[in-house]
Amino acid sequence: MKPEALTAHLEVFRSRRVAVVLLLGFASGLPLALTGGTLQAWLTVSGVDIRTIAWFTWIGVPYLLKFLWSPLMDRFVPPWLGRRRGWIVMTQAALVAGMLGMAATSPDDSLLLLGLFALWVAFVSASQDIVIDAYRTDILLVAERGVGAAVSVLGYRIAILVSGGLALILADQIGWRPTYVAMAALMLIGVGAALWAPEPAMPPAAPITLRAAVIEPLRDFFTRAGAVQLLLLIMLYKFGDALAGTLITAFLIRGVGFTPTDVGVINKGLGLVSLLLGALVGGTLLTRMSLYRALMWFGMLQAISNLSFMFLAWSGKSYAWLVFAVSFENLASGMGTAAFVALAMSLCNVAFSATQYALLSALASLGRVLFGPLAGELVSAFGWANFFFLTFIAALPGLWLLWLLRGRLAPAPAGGQAY
């Protein structure tokens, strides 16, 4: 690549829009582990049985249903900070309240009450995702989408490492309740990002009526050629990766025998290093590769990475295998997610970005949320090693469908010159 072309590619990393997307990615990812892996660890060390823990994955159902109320967030504009940023700050305030509610209870006091607070956090977090995803789609220039997708994933995964890794270490030292209070305080990063964030140069007008906010986004999408096949691709592309992650914390603590601190330091801390590398590699490649090639290569890597946990299950409590599995999974999953976000943004009409992106991301969450109880049954029936092999098999239909649809994806790269 010529030096001037390389300079043009790297210039997008200095954009204020890209910096805001990074910080909002952090705000979006922070609540997820607190109702997922971290809560799973809390339940595990409290002695809750694996089937009950598996059912707690349904707390994430709001992530599947968020497209139902996303038209409201497209239609109505808060009286401050604009159509997107106003909603972002409102949801962040509600998230702080929900996290403090979780901190006020415990599995020993009332498992039901803890679950209800966690459900509230998941609902508000899904609502925050609606507007953050829409804002990212609205604000980024076409040339910034590849890097924007990568840094959004980077911020998102760093937040998960904080609320899923640092939180586990803190919980071992200071207890679960103070840890959740500390995580609530970190949401101020998102508030600051929303206040600093610029408005789009030409913000799309909100739908005039609620009916238009519901019907027009769907009509716009489903009148496109191959719309149903593209939705199926969205649903299947990260299915295997998401299914493997549903019970990963319970696997490492109860299935293999690592301590919460081990999981926090190695699974999350080392994962951050791998994630940084994956984000840099993925973001750079997304500026040069065609979207199809990025999706295919990154998708194959994330499918194969599931097998590393199968070998960890076979080897038992092996720190060497844990380091390898964690590094490989974070690298591959981060790259695959960056390509997926670029795909989803390319499919959205900015006039209806909240509703359309909510629908796409909800379909992508099926493996992580809807099939959580099934994951628990599979582990109970076949064991951990066979479970992770099945998640590898579950990733293959998405890659096959991607190959079939290769001619329908935009041939241009996410921002740059294709190979």
Image (cartoon, helix red, strand yellow):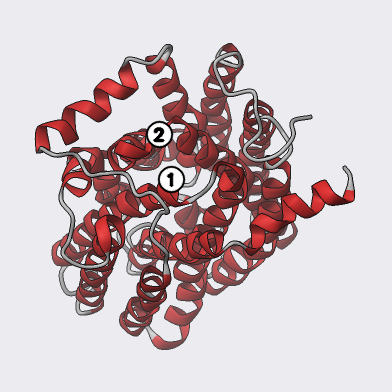
User: What secondary structure is marked by label 2?
Assistant: loop
Left or right for 195, reference 123:
right
Tell which of 71 and 42 is nearer to you: 71
Mark pair 1, 2: CA separation = 8 Å
Amino acid carrying label 2: it is Cys
Residue 275 visible at all = no
Which residue ends up furthest to the front in the rendered image? 202
Query: Above or below — where is 266 with respect to 143?
Result: below
Residue 353 in the image, given as x and y percentages of width and height: 34, 40
Callout 1 touching callout 2 (CB < 8 Å): yes
Residue situated furthest right in the rendering: 2
Q: In the image shown, does 417 or 409 lie closer to the viewer?
A: 417
Q: Residue at the location (25% across, 21% down)? A: 219
Q: Is residue 272 left or right of residue 181?
A: right
Give the amino acid type for the residue marked by disc 1 in the picture.
Answer: Thr
Badge number at residue 97: none
Q: Which residue is mark 1?
A: 137
Which quadrant of the view contains residue 372? Answer: top left
Q: Residue at x 16, y 61 (%)?
A: 116
On the question of residue 332 being in view, the answer is: yes
Residue 215: x and y in percent read: 18, 27
Q: Residue 207: horizontal and vertical position, in percent?
A: 19, 39
Q: Which residue corresponds to the image point at 37% horizontal and 42% vertical from the top-left?
A: 376
Q: Secondary structure at mark 1?
A: helix
Figure quadrant of the N terminus = top right
Using the image, tell me which numbered label, if any, was put on residue 348.
2
> Does 92 sit above or below residue 181?
above
Q: Residues within 10 Å of mark 2 (few under 14, many from 20)?
A: many
* Residue at 48% from the left image edge and 57% from the top image edge: 249
